[in-house]
Image (tube, rainbow, N blue to C red):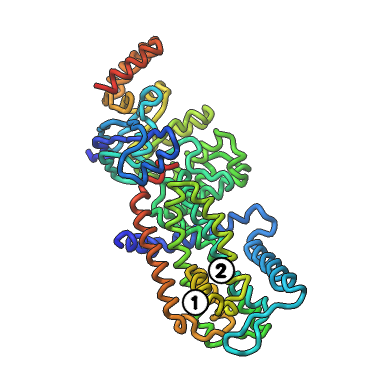
């Protein structure tokens, strides 16, 4: 099988500055200022063509950072990401310009992706139909509800037909009917052998939809395997974690990050 | 130097895209106004008339002002003198202020693009360039009727338009990186530009300055590359200065030296930081 996403030893370091002057000093001087914070630490995983990989983990485990790195939005500090094909990220209201109307956003987004006018004209009605915005399509995006925004974002990304689709919590905003429709669309993608990454806190959706689960914990891979293997472990971990006191949680975090 | 060539290549490779997106921006910026695109021309016309009224009329106590004619002919009335310079400024000033923030204001929206980031400032500059070309055309038409018809010297105009564009891009490219790294620079730039309008011979007449401090004052003012462009537009449109780019060849060299240095530094910084711009938001 063809490899579609290869992530090797990827780390992402953020700098935490206590003063804003440290930020400037850090740019200018070779000496390092500020405190290092690793959002991701030596993450390795490979997804094959047609895989649907779910990212799970508690808040702050690096799910969104990893999906942003794979989508090419955020640069990695260390390691390499190799993709076979284009990746499109769908996140709530990602990449929409508030002052433009829905229609103009569609056009701009398509222009940015290098489509020509003919292709845009072909795509536009499909996107509008899928987004179900009706009259609102010619209203500025700032008047949209969050559900409408994510519908538009989803409709654009899905219709430009990327090879790799990354969905970051985007389905949790829309109503049931739209979630259903999106899931159908994603099943269609799956059948066509596209690779998908699915970030969500809904274990139900994960079970229904994913083949593999990548479990992240404080920026490290805790486990990577099939849904059947990983999800039960993750669920029992969640139960345990919920019961921990704040101090136990901190101790646990220390233990994981220092190992 | 290598990054300068890369950036330059990227501009040519994505020229079509720049053209299309900038037209799109131009259209959409004016979408909310009833008069739409007409504002791109109306706004400069209003500016020209107020500057003319204050600096050409009120300031001299209601008598018309004139500029010495370098060719020794009749003195040049203030209006044509002003217009030639002001059109350069009305392109450069918005292109520089809006261009310099073009990257950091859009980064989050347009993070995923199929083209390099060096193209973004050029999109903003281009969207100011269309109205500029229309203004230049209108100016040429106006000059036909007030005694400065098209002459052989008008041939210089495309050169000076190109020079203006090149300088603006070099300047803006450097500024986009600096403003993304340090946001204060945007404010500094806006304040400085307000001053530069008065340091460029747009509202005042440069040739009567020739002997002040033994000519040293003019030399000092000429360090500002916009001085070259404004005088160049005048030479081309009014046709009274002869072949400006040849007769002041030292100044031409200086102008291109500054432009290229700005571009090389700007491109080097841009390439060094562009992958990490998003971390600075």
Question: Which residue lies most toward the bottom here?
Answer: B73
Closest to the observer, A228 or B137 = B137
Report the residue marked by disc 2. Answer: B200
| Neighbourhood count class around disc 2 (C-alpha, 10 Å): few under 14, some 14–19, many 20 upward | many
Of label 1 and label 2, which has the lower sequence position? 1
Q: Where is residue B32 drawn, in percent x and y? A: 65, 52
Which of the 4 quarters of the picture holds residue B44?
bottom right
Q: Residue at x 43, y 80 (%)?
A: B249
**In the displayed structure, would residue B151 be above or below residue B55?**
below
* Subunit that carries the residue with mark 2: B
Q: Nearer the viewer, residue B109 or A93?
A: B109
Going 45% across and 63% down the picture, which residue do you hit? B169
Chain of the residue under label 1: B
Q: As drawn, which residue projects farthest toward the right?
A: B62
- Tell me if residue A46 can be seen: yes
Residue at the far left: name it. Answer: A1
Q: Which residue is mark 1?
A: B158
Q: Please tell me how crowded label 1 is: few (under 14), some (14-19), or many (20+) other residues with Cα within 10 Å.
A: few
The residue positioned 35% from the left and 39% from the top of the image is A69
């Amino acid at each position: 099988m063809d490899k579609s996403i290869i992530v090797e030893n990827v780390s992402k370091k953020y700098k935490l500055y206590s003063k804003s002057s440290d930020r400037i000093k850090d740019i200018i001087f070779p000496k390092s200022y500020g405190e290092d914070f690793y959002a991701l630490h030596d993450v390795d995983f490979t997804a094959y063509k047609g895989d649907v990989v779910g990212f799970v983990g508690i808040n702050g485990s690096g799910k969104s950072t990893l999906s942003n790195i794979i989508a090419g939005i955020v640069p990695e500090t260390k390691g390499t990401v190799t993709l076979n094909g284009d990746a499109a990220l769908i996140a709530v209201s990602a990449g929409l310009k508030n002052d433009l109307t829905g229609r103009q956003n569609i056009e701009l987004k398509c222009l940015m992706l290098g489509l020509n006018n003919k292709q845009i004209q072909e795509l536009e009605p499909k996107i509008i139909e899928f987004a179900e915005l009706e009259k609102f399509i010619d209203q500025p995006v700032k008047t949209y509800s969050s559900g409408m925004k994510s519908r538009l974002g989803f409709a654009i990304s899905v219709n430009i037909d990327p090879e790799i689709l990354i969905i970051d919590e985007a389905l949790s905003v829309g109503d049931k009917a739209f979630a259903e429709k999106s899931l159908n669309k994603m099943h269609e993608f799956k059948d066509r052998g596209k690779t998908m990454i699915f970030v969500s806190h809904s274990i139900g959706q994960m079970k229904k939809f994913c083949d593999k689960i990548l479990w992240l914990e404080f920026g490290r891979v805790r486990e990577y395997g099939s849904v059947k293997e990983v999800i039960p472990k993750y669920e029992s971990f969640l139960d345990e974690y919920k019961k921990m006191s704040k101090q136990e949680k901190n101790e646990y975090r220390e233990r994981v990050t220092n190992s | 130097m290598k990054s300068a060539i890369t950036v330059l290549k990227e501009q040519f490779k994505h020229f079509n895209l720049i053209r299309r997106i900038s037209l799109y921006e131009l259209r959409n910026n004016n979408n909310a106004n009833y008069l739409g695109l007409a504002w791109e021309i109306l706004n400069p016309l209003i500016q020209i008339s107020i500057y003319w009224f204050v600096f050409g009329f009120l300031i001299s106590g209601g008598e018309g002002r004139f500029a010495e004619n370098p060719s020794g002919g009749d003195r040049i009335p203030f209006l044509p003198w002003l217009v030639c310079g002001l059109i350069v400024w009305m392109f450069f000033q918005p292109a520089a202020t809006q261009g310099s923030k073009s990257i950091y204001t859009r980064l989050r929206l347009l993070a995923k693009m199929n083209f390099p980031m060096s193209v973004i400032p050029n999109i903003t500059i281009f969207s100011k360039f269309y109205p500029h070309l229309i203004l230049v055309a209108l100016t040429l038409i106006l000059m036909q009727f007030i005694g400065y018809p098209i002459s052989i010297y008008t041939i210089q105009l495309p050169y000076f338009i190109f020079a203006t564009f090149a300088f603006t891009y070099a300047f803006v490219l450097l500024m986009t990186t600096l403003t993304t790294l340090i946001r204060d620079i945007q404010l500094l730039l806006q304040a400085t530009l307000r001053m530069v309008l008065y340091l460029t011979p747009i509202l005042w007449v440069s040739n009567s300055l020739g002997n002040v401090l033994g000519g040293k004052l003019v030399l000092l003012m000429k360090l500002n590359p916009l001085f070259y462009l404004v005088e160049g537009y005048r030479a081309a449109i009014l046709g009274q200065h002869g072949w400006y780019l040849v007769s002041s060849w030292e100044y031409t060299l200086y102008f291109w030296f500054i432009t290229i240095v700005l571009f090389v530094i700007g491109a080097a910084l841009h390439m060094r930081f562009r992958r990490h711009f998003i971390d600075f938001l």
